[in-house]
Image (cartoon, helix red, strand yellow):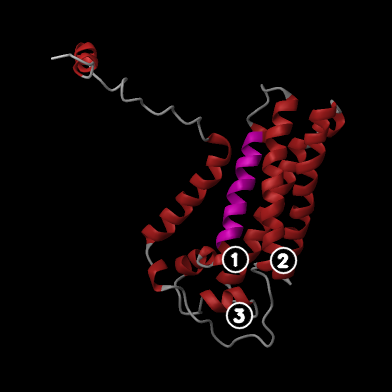
Amino acid sequence: MIPELGHFALILATLVALVLGTLPLLGAHQNRMTWVALARPAASAMALLITFSFACLTQAFVTSDFSVVYVAQHSNSLLPIQYRVAAVWGGHEGSLLLWMLMLSWWAFAVAMLSRQLPETMVARVLGTLGLVAFGFLLFILITSSPFERLLPAAAEGKDLNPCCRTSAWSFTRRCSTWAMSASRWLSPSPSPPCSPASSTPPGRAGHDRGHWLPGAS
């Protein structure tokens, strides 16, 4: 029952992401402030639904629910609790869901910490994040759902990937996911490349140019 609730929450999050990615952007473009005002509540609702969905998947791993295909493929009942939790993002489906969880939290942070910015600007930022979230959530639901059932349930799971059984792996995996999500809206503009002339010491600029002039000694 709990995996089904997580799957249903993921479907609702996809619909909310679609609303977030369309109405606020259209409202900012057409100056419809009622549509613009939907951006913050939609971002908060999306974060809440994805968090609930991820918690449902985590519960399936903690309780060793081997009627879920993803749990049976990446965990077993003999794993310590910390590795069962780490196994939630130990495969393709869980990694995508974790990435979406971080992205939704960043969107929630933008919604909560941008009160001083113009509403239309916030609507465009959150709307863009909503479009990205909608694409990935739709991909998860269609091709990579971590809530698919296995009937009859497996008696035991296969096991966690041995390379994942380190605390360092768990920490770096989460940090890298945070970094990728943050880069969606925190990446600075690239610096212009340094030209060869700018790297020449000032005292040698004239000498180097004169060296290549015809007839220069």
Q: Main secondary structure of the magenta part?
A: helix
Q: Residues within 10 Å of mark 1 (few under 14, many from 20)?
A: some
For the point 67% across and 82% down, the residue is 150
48 relative to 78, above or below:
above
User: Please, what is the three-letter code of the amino acid marked with disc 3?
Assistant: Phe
Q: Residue at x 46, y 74 (%)?
A: 160
Question: Which residue position holds label 2?
Answer: 142
Which quarter of the picture shows residue 5?
A: bottom right
Q: Which residues are magenta?
A: 95-110
Asked which secondary structure carries label 1, the reply is helix
Between discs 2 and 1, the one toward the N terminus: 1
Tag 1: residue type?
Glu
Instruction: Please name whichever residue, 191 or 37, is drawn nearer the observer in this view of the structure.
Output: 191
Q: Residue furthest front?
A: 215
Residue position for label 3: 66
Q: Label 2, label 1: how many angstroms apart (C-alpha)?
A: 11 Å
Q: Is residue 98 magenta?
A: yes
Q: Mark 2 belongs to which amino acid?
A: Ile
> CA gap, disc 3 to disc 2?
21 Å
For disc 3, the neighbor class at 10 Å (few under 14, some 14 to 19, many from 20) is: many
Residue 44 at x, y percent in the picture: 71, 42
Looking at the image, tell me whether mark 3 or mark 2 is earlier in sequence order.
Answer: 3
| Residue at disc 2, secondary structure | helix
Residue 48 appears in view: no
| Mark nearer the N terminus (1 vs 3) | 3
Q: Which mark is residue 93?
A: 1
* Quadrant in which the N terminus appears: bottom right
Q: Nearer the viewer, mark 1 or mark 3?
A: 1
Relative to residue 202, is residue 116 depicted above or below?
below
